[in-house]
Structures are given as structure tokens and as C-alpha cells.
Image (spheres, grey):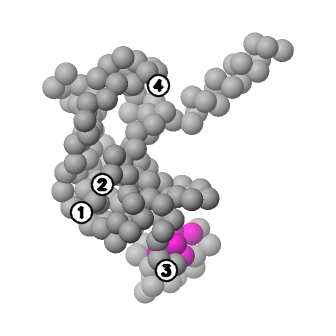
């Protein structure tokens, strides 16, 4: 779902997961960022260049996962520049949770730092199955079909 990244809270509509597995909570932004921001995100940046780049992540948040009006779990994102980069987007992980198939959930995310400078990059809150599920499934399929 689209988010503004302004300090404050967002709440997802109720959603149902279809796997008993670990799910990732993350913010995805398209690589429409200014060149300076992209340079600050890259790992090859000189760590001594503190005048130019903020050492903390632009995405800082706490989150609460609800099911049946009860808190299932809570978490806080890391403050350091923790991100994953692909060809067309940058992903900031906020947390993860273990979910039950068929169960209904609502996620509340409270942004604790103003990240609106990333608003030009179409930020979205995303919940998805952790990659390890797909890797494990592929190995099982490979081993069973040999």
C-alpha cells in the first residue's frame, strides 16, 4: 500500500496469509531518487563522508501486528542504513513475523522519523513471504524429483 513516510501511523486493511511461514515487512521505493541519495545508499560510500550523508536510515518505524483484536507481535526497525537494492527499487526492511495460514491480520506501522524526502520515489509498505521459503521449497522439489 502507498505510504507518505511522514512521522505518524498507518494501518493496513485486514489481510490473510496463505502460508505458515515468516513474512517480511518492508518499505519499497522506486529508484527515482536524487543522485545524492542513491550515492548515500550504496555500500561503496566512504564511511568518513558524514558531512554529505546521514548515517541513519531514512526509514525508522515501530510496528504492531494484530489478529482478532489482539497483539500478535511488535518490533522496531534498525536505525542503521539497512537496505536491499535491485535494478529498479530499494527496499528497507522494518521487521518480520511468523504467520498462520488462513488467519486475518492488521499491521500498524508508526513512522518515528520523517522519511518524506523519499516521497518522490513512490514509497509502498509491503508484506511478503521471506525468500527462505522459496529456497527451501526449490531444494525439496529438487531432492524429491531426482
Question: Residue 82, can we see it?
Answer: no
Q: Which residue is found at the position 50% from the left and 83% from the top?
A: 49
Which residue lies under the disc numbered 4? 21
Q: Quadrant of residue 50?
A: bottom left
Mark closer to the chain start, 2 or 4: 2
Q: Which residue is mark 1?
A: 6
Looking at the image, is 36 positioned above or below residue 118?
A: below
Label 2: which residue?
3
Which residues fall within the magenta stretch?
A: 36-42
State which mark lies toward you, 3 or 4. Answer: 3
Give residue 84's position: percent from left, percent from top.
54, 55
| Residue at 45% across, 85% down | 52
Quadrant for residue 118, please give it. bottom left
Helix, strand or loop for disc 1: loop
How far is the residue under mark 2 from the one under mark 4? 25 Å
Nearer to me, 111 or 87: 87
Q: For the residues marked 2 and 1, what is the alpha-carbon distance in whole angstroms? A: 8 Å
Is residue 34 on the magenta stretch?
A: no
Mark 1 neighbour class, 10 Å CA radius: few under 14, some 14 to 19, many 20 or more: some
**Could you give the CA–CA distance between mark 1 and mark 4, rounded to whole angstroms?**
30 Å
Mark 3 touching mark 4, by CB under 8 A?
no
Q: Given this view, does label 2 or label 1 mark the residue nearer the observer?
A: 2
Q: CA distance from mark 3 to mark 4?
A: 37 Å
Look at the magenta stretch and give its main secondary structure: helix
User: Which residue is denoted by mark 3 in the rendering?
Assistant: 36
Query: Dot 4: what SS?
Result: strand
Amino acid at each position: 500500500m502507498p505510504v507518505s513516510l511522514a512521522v505518524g501511523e498507518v494501518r493496513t486493511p485486514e489481510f490473510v496469509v496463505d502460508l505458515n511461514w515468516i513474512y517480511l515487512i518492508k518499505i519499497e521505493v522506486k529508484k527515482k531518487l536524487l543522485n545524492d541519495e542513491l550515492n548515500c545508499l550504496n555500500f561503496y560510500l566512504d564511511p568518513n563522508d558524514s558531512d554529505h550523508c546521514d548515517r541513519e536510515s531514512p526509514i525508522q518505524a515501530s510496528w504492531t501486528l494484530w489478529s482478532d483484536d489482539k497483539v500478535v507481535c511488535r518490533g522496531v526497525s534498525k536505525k542503521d542504513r539497512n537496505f536491499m537494492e535491485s535494478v529498479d527499487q530499494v527496499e528497507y526492511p522494518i521487521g518480520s513475523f511468523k504467520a498462520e495460514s488462513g488467519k486475518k491480520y492488521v499491521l500498524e506501522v508508526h513512522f518515528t522519523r520523517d522519511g518524506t524526502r523519499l516521497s518522490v520515489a513512490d514509497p509502498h509498505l509491503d508484506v511478503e513471504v521471506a525468500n527462505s521459503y522459496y529456497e527451501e521449497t526449490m531444494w525439496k522439489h529438487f531432492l524429491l524429483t531426482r
